[in-house]
Image: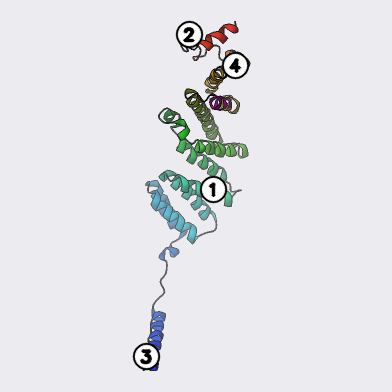
Amino acid sequence: MQKKLSSVVATCVVLALSACSWLPEKTDESKNVPVTKLYAEAREEMAGGHYEAAIKLWERLETNYPFGNYANQAQMEIAYAHYKSGDQAQALAAADRFIREHPTHPQVDYMYYLRGLISFNDQIGLISQLYKQDPTERDPKATRESFAAFKVLVDRYPNSKYAPDAIERMRYLTTAMAKYEVHVANYYYRRGAYLASLNRAMNAVSDYPDAPAREEALYLMIRNYDKMGMTELRNDTVRVFNANYPNSKFTRAGGNNESWWKFWSRSDK
């Protein structure tokens, strides 16, 4: 009986396999779509703001046609589509992938520019937000990453059509980073952490000498030196401050009531 059952099972298996061989193979219809059609469809989705649909089409194009200009363009478009859809992590990953795989591509300068834009948009509004939250809770990582990407673009491709805009954005980022340092310095000063405040103010002065926030940073250095009893360093900083900002809003009459200001202000006359 056991042998008979085994024979029946074996026969069924053979029949099943034979039936499968008669069935037509399942094919991926998208593989037969011409590259120009996939490209046109993806561009149409992009133009309509349907970025998720566009990304799928770009990925399909790259999979079906992995070599040549269309594949390279698809990679760039994927990064841009993620950027437009607000997916920062995927956008950065896609841009980095292109830069890594195509370091000599004629349009790699654009990918550095896009990388800067991705991080730049993450920190837009930093200055306006500083006074709405604890500054130590705000990570300026995106600001630094954006600046670094733009700097690579400007240094390596000074003649790129994206370089002028990158330079302008770098100026803005420098202002933002300096203001962040000063805001943190103020945060520590208000809490009596004068050494920590001094260090952040000094960072702003040394790292961002051309930023508008340098004025307030020097002013904070004076206040911290005074609080810590470092009279000589305070007076040296006062002389630098007065030479650079003789009409500073931070030291105008009525702008500050601390006795130490009156003391060292008189000592310089």
Residue named by callout 1 = 96
Regarding mark 1 in the picture, which secondary structure is present there?
A: helix
Disc 4 versus disc 3: nearer the observer = 4
The residue located at (58%, 13%) in the rendering is 242
Q: Is residue 192 magenta?
A: yes
Which secondary structure class fits the magenta region best? helix
Q: Is residue 129 left or right of residue 263?
A: left
For label 3, the SS is helix
Circle 3 crowding by C-alpha within 10 Å: few under 14, some 14–19, many from 20: few
Task: Inspect the image, locate mark 1, and give the three-letter code of the amino acid beneath it.
Answer: Asp
How far separated are the C-alphas under marks 2 and 3? 106 Å
Residue 253, numbered label: 2
Of the numbered discs 1 and 4, the one sitting upstream in the chain is 1
* Residue 125 position (above or below residue 30): above
* Disc 1 from disc 2: Cα separation: 53 Å
Q: Where's residue 45, x and y in %?
A: 39, 50
Q: Which mark is first along the chain, 3 or 4?
A: 3
Front one among 241 and 264? 264
Quarter of the image with the N terminus is bottom left
